[in-house]
Image (cartoon, rainbow, N blue to C red):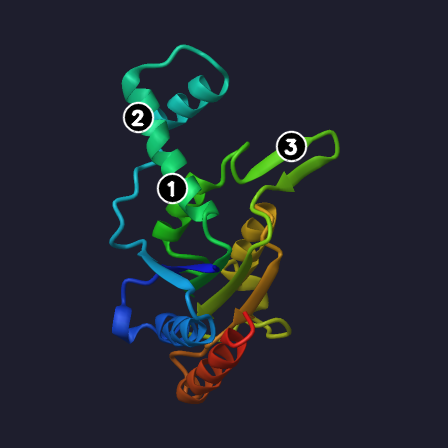
Amino acid sequence: MSRLLYIKASPREERSHSIAVADAFSEAWKEANAGGEVVIKNIFEEDLPPFDGFRVQAKYNIMHGKEHSAEQKQAWEEIEKLIAEFKSFDRFVFAVPMWNFSIPYRLKQYIDLIVQPGYTFGMNETGYFGMVEGAKALTVYASGGEYQEGNPLETFNFQSTYLRSVLGFMGITDVIEIEPRGTLMDSREANREQALGEAREIAKTF
C-alpha cells in the first residue's frame, strides 16, 4: 500500500495557490489509489524542534560514540523520529510558495532536521549517495512572478532549484514539478486552472 506524505509549507491555507493545487492532487491520488494513505503535515502548525547548538552537539556526541546526557539522547531521538516518519512514505507532495526567491523558513527548518548523514544520505569513497530509495515526489511551486526556465528572472529562483537538489541528494530523483506562478499577475487564474488540471491528471498514475 502506497503512503503519501503531503507537506504544506504555506501558512495561507485557503488563499494559497500551491495548497489549492496540492489539495487537488492529493484528492485525485486518493481516488486513484484505493487503500492508499494520505498524511498531511502542515509545518507551520508542527512543533518542530530547533536545530540549535544543543541538538547539534547531541548529534555529534551520539553519532561519534562520545559521552552524552539523557537530555541530549532525548533531543536526538526527537529528530530521529522525524526522519523515520519521513522515510516511512514512498510518495510525497510539497506545496511550496516562494519567499524572497527561496522557500519558507519553516520548510528549511524541517529539511535541516531530516537531512542527516547515515539516515537520509550516506558517504563512501566515490562521494555522497541518497538513502531514501524508491520514492516519488510532486512539488508545487507558487510565486508572484514568473521564474520558470527561460524566463529572464530564472536566476532569482532558489525555490525549485534548491528543493529539487536537496530531494535528489536524499535519493528522491523521480520528481514532477507543477508551477502555478504569476499569482500577482493578470494570468494568475489561467495559470491556476492549468496547474489544477495537471495535478489531477498526474495523480492518476503517480
Q: Residue at x 39, y 77 (%)?
A: 24
Query: Residue reaching furthest right?
Result: 126
Residue 16 has which mark?
none
Task: Give how far apart the Cα atoms at labels 1 and 2 are.
Answer: 13 Å
Q: Which circle, 3 or 1, is nearer the viewer?
A: 1
Residue 74 has which mark?
2
The spot of residue 138 in percent (x, y) is 51, 65
Sort mark 2 into few (<14), some (14-19) or many (20+) by Cα contacts within 10 Å: few
Task: Give how far apart the Cα atoms at labels 2 and 3 are.
Answer: 26 Å
Q: Amino acid at mark 1?
A: Leu
Q: Answer yes or no: is residue 74 visible.
A: yes
Residue 123 has which mark?
3
Residue 82 has which mark?
1
Residue situated in front as seen by the camera: 142 or 42: 42
Q: Quadrant of residue 82?
A: top left
- Quarter of the figure with the C terminus: bottom right
**Earlier residue among tags 1 and 2:** 2
**Earlier residue among tags 3 and 1:** 1
Q: Residue at x 40, y 27 (%)?
A: 56
The spot of residue 202 in percent (x, y) is 53, 76
Q: Answer yes or no: is residue 8 visible.
A: no
Residue 154 in the image: above or below residue 24: above
